[in-house]
Image (cartoon, rainbow, N blue to C red):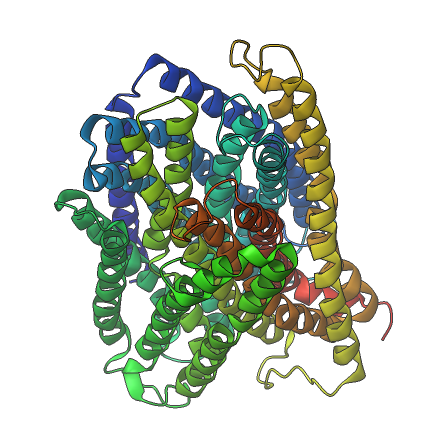
Amino acid sequence: MSSSILGIILAVVVLALAYVLFNFLRIRKMKEGTAEMAEMAGIIRSGATTFLKTEFRVIFIVVIAVAAIFSLFVEKTSGITLIFGACMSSIVCVLGMRSATYANVRTANKARETLSIGETVKVALCGGSISGISVQAFGMLGLIAVLLIWGLDPEASSTGFLANMSCNPSVMRITTYSLGCSLVAMFNRVAGGNYTKAADISSDILAKVRHDMPEDDSRVPNVIADFIGDNVNDIAGNCSDLLESFVATMAAGIMIAMSIFKDMPIFHSAWLFPVVLAGCGLLSCILGLGFAAVRKMGDNPSRELNLATWISAGLTILVGLGAAYYFFAGQDLANTGFNVGWISPWLCSVLGILSGIAIGTITEYYTSADFKPTRKLAEIAPEGEAFIVTKGDAVGSRSCLLPILIIGIALFAAGKLCGTYGIALSALGMLAFVGATVSIDAFGPIADNAGGLAESCHLPAQVRTITDKLDSVGNTTAAIGKGFAIGSAAFATVALIVAYVQNYTAAGAEPVLNMASFIVVAGGIIGGALIEYFSALLTDNTIDAAQGMAEEGDKQLSVPGVLEGTVKPNYNALIEMAAKQALKKMLLPSVLALLIPIVGGIIFGVEFVGGILVGATICAIPRALFMGNSGGAFDNAKKYIESGALQGHGKGSAAHKAAVTGDTIGDTRKDVVGVALDIFIKMMSTVANTLGSVFSHITLIK
């Protein structure tokens, strides 16, 4: 039965890949616009491609080294699946980045040709859907391939080529596939965040503060590096981030099912259901995005994008109900913990879906200029930098409570409905329609690049008005995407922690992590401190790189003819500088996430690592929400002032400069630290899951 069902899900994945190919070819056929637009788009595309190629050389070495260690010392085939996961994540990064660098200029050109917001939105969403559907399709493709090639055996045992510590090869293959995705995601987020924000901050300093120039003026060489960074971080980095979350939640569901239900009649149904639920979500995303692509769009981009999300989520709920009935209705559910019968797993997934939508809505409220918090932030800007920064911090802190309350209630309810298996399903529910959420998130940087191209290529004011509208909506969708990523990371990490405790618990014993134990408390305190250190490390790296790039940009602006527009600056020098700094500074933060659970587990044991995971998660979730939402509010408060909505305080005013200061602070928060924290805790949890059985054998201090 399992092979035929996996075959059906594989057919859905193939359909999704065909949809991706169709959209990619459609984007490629569209016109790029003027010769200047085509030239500028070519520079952006070339710079982003060069950066990824250089980055992947480093990632390749790390992945091969880690894979070799796993195959030699843990389980023979685990190195292969780790490489497989890294490949799936890398393909999505490259495909998403390429599609975005084709879509950005075509979005600007569609606005130039039609002067229609609705038609322009369609182009940007088409480009974004390539990223979104790819994330879900390739994540599932790799996992289904692992399951079809090696199968799933909860009783099997295997060792590495050189070591004799036995482990379950099925668990190891699934966790190392997820770990391969995590490695690429961590490198992408850290390096991409450094690249884009160093370029963004330095270009803002040069254009808005030192020289009173337009934001995306092509005379500032840092601007082009900023355009490239939008694709490197907000597209490639985000794709690998959410693919990793998606795969991790499916893996957690399968592992928990193997641990809890292996001796029960529902075993096959329990481990298949997470994969089928993900497949239902993928099909729903294709239908939701396809509907948005064919319908006539109006002049309200937010409404059109929200509609695609609601359709995808609604269909996922309906089809998921049918899947739950098929797998669990009529089965013997005694002692399974399904407290309301066969519908229990479905209810858990619905909790996750509704939580994701609610967190996105709350994030929109705190970061969109359509609502009071961001408008109040803009209105206080005339009082100066200190006021806007303090008020922005308050907005960020206030925005944490409701999302965390929702996460806590959903996890509690899922646990009551379906035990630890329900927690994994609620995490997967939130990510079951990730194809739609990433598609709409990717809309943001595509629209941002389109607006930048419109200004740097001197397109008519009406075009810039359209792209500014899309950019504003894109800022909100990007902020919602970050909130969704953080919320999904919280669910995924909790599911992985539960799976971790299940994995090292003896068969038949109740899985317990004793929070009153001094070992667990010690790990928890250290885990919380590591979050602060990791945040500081990323911030320092970005500011150092931005300072160097600002100085280099200033030197180029002092070259005769550059400020006058008669001589083009040396874009390549800034692009290479941004890439060099980002790649130089990505290794330490990325390796920390890999080594912390390994060192802690080998020296102090499995409970100490459990404490690290819990402590880090408790500190990281509010920290990431604060960073993302305060940064988003700063950004949109600045744009609110730039739009002329704050009477008497437009571009170039003291209020605007204060808002630019807030935006510069927020850039590092939302696009470097906030987005990397969720991968940090997920990667540590994935490493812990992978090596939990090893820690049980070789703890040095017992």
Q: Quadrant of residue 685?
A: bottom right
Quarter of the image for residue 686 reads bottom right
Give the percent coordinates (x, y) of residue 637.
47, 54
Q: Nearer the viewer, residue 518 or 217?
A: 217
- Displayed quadrant of residue 471: top left
Q: Position of residue 395 (x, y in %)?
A: 53, 67
Task: Residue at 28%, 29% (x, y): give it.
Answer: 27
Task: Give the farthest residue toward the right.
Answer: 701
Q: Is residue 401 left or right of residue 104?
A: right
Residue at image position (29%, 54%) is 282
Q: Compared with residue 387, is residue 137 higher up or lower down, i.e. above or below?
A: above
Q: Nearer the viewer, residue 25 or 158?
A: 25
The image position of residue 562, as x and y in percent, is 58, 14
Q: Is residue 271 in view from this perspective?
A: no
Q: Nearer the viewer, residue 428 or 465?
A: 465
Q: Say left or right for 633 vs 266.
A: right
When the figure is inspected, residue 408 is found, relative to residue 107, above or below; the finding is: below
Q: Is residue 622 left or right of residue 312?
A: right
Q: Position of residue 20 (x, y in %)?
A: 29, 38
Question: In this rendering, does residue 332 appear at all?
Answer: yes
Q: Quadrant of the N terminus?
A: bottom left
